[in-house]
Image: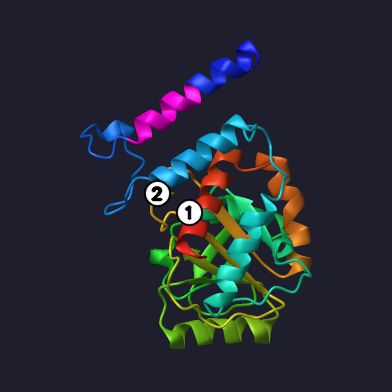
Amino acid sequence: MSEQKMMLAGRISKFSELLQRENQNRKDLSLSTTPGDKDLSLSTLTALEKALLAGETHYTVRPGIPELRRRIAVAIQARGGMIPDAKDPADNVLITTSESEALFVILLGLGLESGEILTQTPSSCRHQALLGLRGLRLETEWGSAARAIYRPIHLSETDHARLLRCALESDLPDILDLSADWSSELPRCDLRRTLIIGNLNGIKGLSLFRVGYLMAPRALIARCRPWKQAFSICTAAPSQRVAVLRLTEEGS
């Protein structure tokens, strides 16, 4: 083993040792940033350490690890969401660092700017500043300046239906924001125009690793992918590997 690899192995082992202190009181060593969250299991930490020592410290394929993309696509479909239209479900998903980055690449990829985004309650949207950078403002009623629909997951079934109907009738992109929700049954999606964004913070142990995603029809993913790759190349390899491990444990 080379000297450089020995140094890396020592650092990874130390990192793993710190994370395994389940009963410690020092908050700076806890992976949890979400109330009620728990640290990663010993089996996950061991598998992560093995992956890092095997070299998973470099760039992954730019859209994200195929296994992770595939698991997210299958999990969303199982919740009643979008049915992948690609031969490999992984090709319907991009891995990002957050749902905010996923939204940003949608705005750039679809050329959404200077107009209105139709939603139910503008004040409940966490992305108003991001939308403002593109000259977009949130409105509750359809207008000629409408550029897209924005549906946060917490809306009622009636509100989801109204907004999706507007997307269909006006031929607009339909952005469904799941945020950290990883358990609710999903509202109806349109197989040609719905783009689903979210993050994996709702899965125990993942809130520190910053993994988001975008799932959309293959034609729309193709328009968003170059912008995502131009800004962040890929989400950190260890973060993606932890996400795969936790989704495996969760049975997703």
What is the number of the mark on residue 205? 2
Do residues under tags 1 and 2 come within 8 Å of each other at their CB atoms? yes
Q: Does residue 199 appear anywhere in the picture?
A: no
Along the line of sight, which residue is nearer the eye, 132 or 174?
174
What is the number of the mark on residue 146? none
Q: In the rendered view, does 96 fall on the left or right side of 191?
A: left
Tell me which segment is drawn in magenta. Answer: 11-20
Q: CA distance from mark 1 to mark 2?
A: 8 Å
Task: Give the residue furthest to the top.
Answer: 3
Query: Picture coordinates of residue 230 (x, y %)?
Result: 73, 42
Q: In the rendered view, does 193 fall on the left or right side of 102?
A: right
**Residue that mark 1 sits on:** 246
Identify the residue shown where x is 70% and y is 65%: 92
Q: Tell us which disc is closer to us: 1 or 2.
A: 1
Q: Secondary structure at mark 2?
A: loop
What kind of residue is marked 2? Answer: Gly
Q: Residues within 10 Å of mark 1 (few under 14, many from 20)?
A: many
